């Protein structure tokens, strides 16, 4: 390793240790995830630019609402849904059942990298940034296909609301 790289690593390690003394926080691994995100955004931005088509001046309110609801639903599906638990399992531990069709999990402690990924894949708020970015670039590169995919997740989100309303109404009538 070069002297410059060693100094940079030393500075990074010093900053990490000073961040939360006495606590294990996978900051370098979080930084790696931010690097992956940044690389993906950079690559997709270059792809958008390479197409040499002007960016939209704005995203119409209907599309913005569609993409927002789809981002919410896909983020929850990826981070909380029972059927997606096998994909999270290498990075998470089961804590217990959650809301309807969901589970509560926590990051594994086996390594800082697994913990950092576990934090991402169990946090719908964190995942929404990644999912929203995917939908935005999908919208810029293939708007019709992205609207179709977003429509699916928006329909599922609306169905979830109706399921909860139906259950609540049944409890009110029966109760």
Image: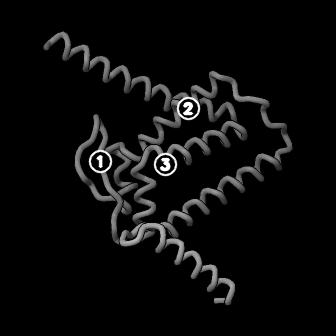
Circle 2 sits in a helix, a strand or a loop, which is it?
helix
Disc nearer the start of the sequence (2/1): 2
Q: Is residue 19 left or right of residue 107?
A: right
Q: Looking at the image, is mark 1 or mark 3 nearer the viewer?
A: 3
The quadrant where residue 61 appears? top right
Residue 1 coordinates in the image, percent (x, y): 64, 89
Residue occupied by mark 1: 104
Q: Is residue 170 left or right of residue 2?
A: left
Disc nearer the start of the sequence (1/3): 1
What's the residue at 30%, 37% (across, down)?
101
Q: Which of these two is toward me, 130 or 29?
A: 29
Circle 1 sits in a helix, a strand or a loop, which is it?
strand
Q: Is residue 17 left or right of residue 1?
A: left
The quadrant where residue 142 appears? top right
What's the residue at 48%, 36% (across, down)?
72
If the image is split into quadrants, where does the C terminus sit? top left
Residue occupied by mark 2: 68
Contact (Cβ within 8 Å) of mark 2 with mark 1 = no
Outermost residue on the left side: it is: 175
Q: Is residue 129 left or right of residue 120?
A: right
- The number of numbered discs placed on residues in the rendered structure image is 3
Residue 100 coordinates in the image, percent (x, y): 28, 34
Mark sitting on residue 126 = 3
Mark sitting on residue 30 = none
How far apart are labels 2 and 1 at the CA level?
Answer: 24 Å
Against 145, residue 82 (above or below) is: below
What's the residue at 20%, 13% (across, down)?
172
Against 32, residue 125 (above or below) is: above
Circle 3 sits in a helix, a strand or a loop, which is it?
helix
């Amino acid at each position: 390793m070069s002297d410059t790289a060693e100094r940079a690593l030393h500075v990074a390690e010093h900053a990490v240790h000073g961040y939360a003394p006495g606590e294990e926080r996978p900051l370098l691994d979080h930084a790696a995830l931010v690097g992956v995100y940044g690389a993906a955004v950079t690559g997709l931005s270059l792809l958008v630019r390479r197409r040499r088509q002007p960016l939209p001046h704005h995203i119409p309110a209907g599309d913005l609402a569609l993409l927002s609801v789809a981002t919410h639903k896909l983020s929850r599906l990826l981070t909380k849904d029972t059927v997606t638990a096998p994909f999270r399992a290498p990075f998470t531990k089961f804590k217990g059942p959650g809301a309807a069709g969901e589970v509560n999990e926590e990051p594994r402690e086996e390594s800082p990298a697994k913990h950092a990924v576990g934090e991402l894949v169990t946090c719908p708020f964190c995942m929404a940034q990644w999912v929203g970015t995917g939908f935005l670039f999908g919208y810029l590169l293939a708007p019709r296909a992205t609207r179709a995919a977003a429509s699916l997740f928006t329909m599922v989100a609306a169905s979830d609301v109706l399921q909860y309303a139906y259950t609540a109404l049944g409890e009110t009538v029966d109760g």
